[in-house]
Amino acid sequence: MWWRIVLLVVTLPWTLDAAFRAVLAWMALRQPVPEGSGEPTADERVLVVVPSRDEGGRVLPTLTSILEAARPGVETVLLLDGPDPEAEAAARRLGVRALCKDPAGPTKGAALRWLVDRHGGLLEGFDAVLILDVGSSLGPGFFHMPLLPGGADAAQAWLAGRGTGVGDAVILSERAAQRWEDLGRQALGWSVRLRGTGSAYRPGALAALAPELVTAIEDTEASLLLAARGGRVVLTAPGQVVEDVKPSTVGEAARQRSRWLLGQLELPFRHPGALLRLVLRRPFEGLAFAAELASRPLSLTAPLRLGAGIVLTAAGVLQRQPGWLLYGTTVAASLAVDAVVLRKTSGLPWGRLLRSSVGLALSWLGAVLRLPRAATGWVRTRRR
């Protein structure tokens, strides 16, 4: 009997997370993608901040794309996490201001804290601060629409990944998260997730958040802190797309995901008060956030969920216990719902979808092995 109780405790957050995802997907189906006006907006002043850690000349394509998309009122700053003469020289050639945090580390959140603490005056006079990772690029019409609708504390741009191999699965996962989860959250009046690159903040909101960014996943951390304070995070207009280079090999993906996995484990212990406040302020949204933290990455927990569901279902049948049979079936069925949603989002044949998912699962296993190294610094994947 005891082992079934253990399986119940372990799988309950996973099952709840799957149930919430199904609700969000249903809401997204009923909610059309919002349309942007397409009219130029000259009155929103935007500061684009590009954090960079030992990226060298790889900053050039990102900075160039920002300058090509910029209009009057848009300014750019390269935020160097540690000395990087090559990146600084590239910024200087383009006329972009570079700020250097020395010593470097340990995280991107720490670099943003330093920016607010040492150069907080730089944010004054802007309506929005856009964070853009090295390797990301903007289309020419990106700033034609306001980044922050009235009343929003932050906004997340739509992401369009570029990559091959395991990058296919990363792109599909990200697309599903925005199209089926974030759009559903927005339809329910919940805050959407900030995703690191393409995240825009009101300067006051960023200044208030920055001192509390202490984990390796500053985007999820900021999402939690803003929601716990009653803040509003929305999706930008569909035309505001950020293209981002995804890792193409399992090793590159594992290196990138080790940082995310470390932060995922760390976040509930660093901000238990924020999670509790969110549950008390918005119970269903808070419960969904907590279940998500306990259930991701899906590439690792999904096979475990399937196995647990089969075991519990079999135990219910063999021992003639309808309660366990029903729960075990529900756990196993939740995985089928996830698979159908991902298939609908991707439009890929089942075979290719399965191959991509296996590659992504292997990258997460690699990330588990890299956790000790991720704990010692800002882990980033080289951009090509």
Image (spheres, rainbow, N blue to C red):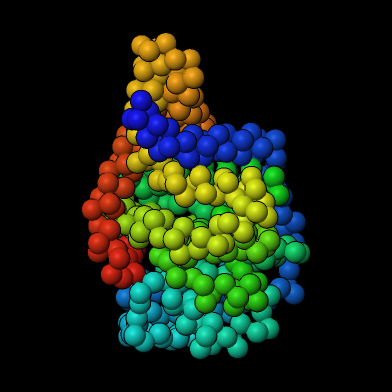
Q: Is residue 101 visible?
A: yes
Residue 35 location in percent, x, y?
Answer: 71, 50
Residue 218 location in percent, x, y?
Answer: 47, 65
Q: Is 201 positioned to the left or the right of 97 in the image?
A: right
Closest to the observer, 114 or 15: 15
Residue 162 location in percent, x, y?
Answer: 42, 52
Q: Is residue 131 above or below residue 236?
A: below
Closest to the observer, 371 or 283: 283
Q: Is 372 positioned to the left or the right of 220 in the image?
A: left
Q: Is 137 positioned to the left or the right of 54 in the image?
A: right
Quadrant of res 298? top left
Q: Is residue 138 visible?
A: no
Quadrant containing the N terminus is top left
Q: Is 192 positioned to the left or the right of 42 in the image?
A: left
Closest to the observer, 263 or 11: 11
Q: Residue at x 40, y 60 (%)?
A: 266
Q: Residue at x 49, y 19 (%)?
A: 323
Quadrant containing the C terminus is bottom left
Closest to the observer, 328 or 218: 328
Q: Residue at x 70, y 41 (%)?
A: 32
Residue 34 location in percent, x, y?
Answer: 70, 48
Q: Is residue 257 above or below residue 326?
A: below
- How many discs mark residues in the rendered view? 0
